Image (cartoon, rainbow, N blue to C red):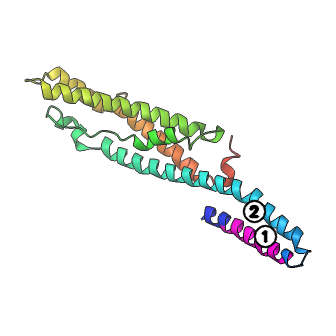
Amino acid sequence: MLRLSIRLITFAALGGALLTGIAGLFGWRPWDASSTALALVAAIAGIPADRWAAAAEQRRQMLSALGRELDKNREVLADPRFFPERQGQSLVYPRLMLSAVDTTFISGVLGGQRDQALLRALLDWRNAAEDVNRRLDITELRLCLVEEIDMGDLVALRLMTVLPDGPFAYAAECLGHLEKTLELDADVPAWRRGLRS
């Protein structure tokens, strides 16, 4: 909406400059100054403002995508296949999604001083999720390749999913911290985000 209004103001100033410029061609010389002024307003205000609005829109879309992905990851962490009573079965475990997080880093939408806490939370979450996904890969391979499942492997798998200081708990903690950081960022109006230290 902001981007559209900036474009409308810019085009209105350009249209006004065009009309006053045409009027100036037909002998109404007092319109030359206003034509030049309107063209300058459109050029000076329109282009940078449109770029700013586009960056704000990209940021909003990225934060929205991150929020949706985090909701899905919360569901993955609560999946019944990770419950201790289901361990020992040859299952394919769901993986934590990281595509929106990776896209956020690649795009460069987040940056500067105001996004440092969010970037730190994203990095922590990404590392924890990759650790869980890697452990799940190894666990699936071990459970599917051996002829007889060793009870020690089952105990290790149970501990991984239920220990309060295990990788699943750490991933859930990082996910919660990232969600809180996103909520705090969403509660701050765009015009004040740059004022935060």
Residue farthest to the left, as pictured? 147
What stretch of residues is rendered in magenta? 8-24
Is residue 103 among the parts visible in the rendering? yes
Residue highlighted by disc 1: 17
Mark seen at residue 42: 2
Q: Residues within 10 Å of mark 1 (few under 14, many from 20)?
A: many
In the rendered view, would you say 11 is above or below 124? below
Identify the image quadrant of the N terminus.
bottom right
**How far, Cα to Cα, is label 1 from label 2?**
9 Å
* Location of residue 103 in the rendering, given as x and y in whole percent from the top left corner: 46, 42
| Closer to the camera in the image, 105 or 77 | 105
Q: Residue at x 37, y 27 (%)?
A: 165
Q: Earlier in the sequence, mark 1 or mark 2?
A: 1
* Location of residue 163 in the rendering, given as x and y in whole percent from the top left corner: 32, 29
In the rendered view, would you say 15 is above or below 191? below
Q: Residues within 10 Å of mark 2 (few under 14, many from 20)?
A: many
* Location of residue 42 in the rendering, given as x and y in whole percent from the top left corner: 75, 62
Q: Secondary structure at mark 2?
A: helix
Taking the image as shown, residue 51 lies to the left or right of residue 102, namely right
Residue farthest to the right, as pictured? 30
| Closer to the camera in the image, 127 or 151 | 127
Mark seen at residue 61: none
Q: Residue at x 79, y 64 (%)?
A: 39
Secondary structure predominantly adopted by residues drawn in magenta = helix
Q: Secondary structure at mark 1?
A: helix
The amino acid type of the residue labelled 1 equals Ala
* Location of residue 57 in the rendering, given as x and y in whole percent from the top left corner: 57, 55
Q: Of circles 1 and 2, which is in front?
A: 1
The amino acid type of the residue labelled 2 equals Ala
Residue 137 among those drawn in magenta: no
Q: Are marks 1 and 2 in contact (CB under 8 Å)?
A: yes
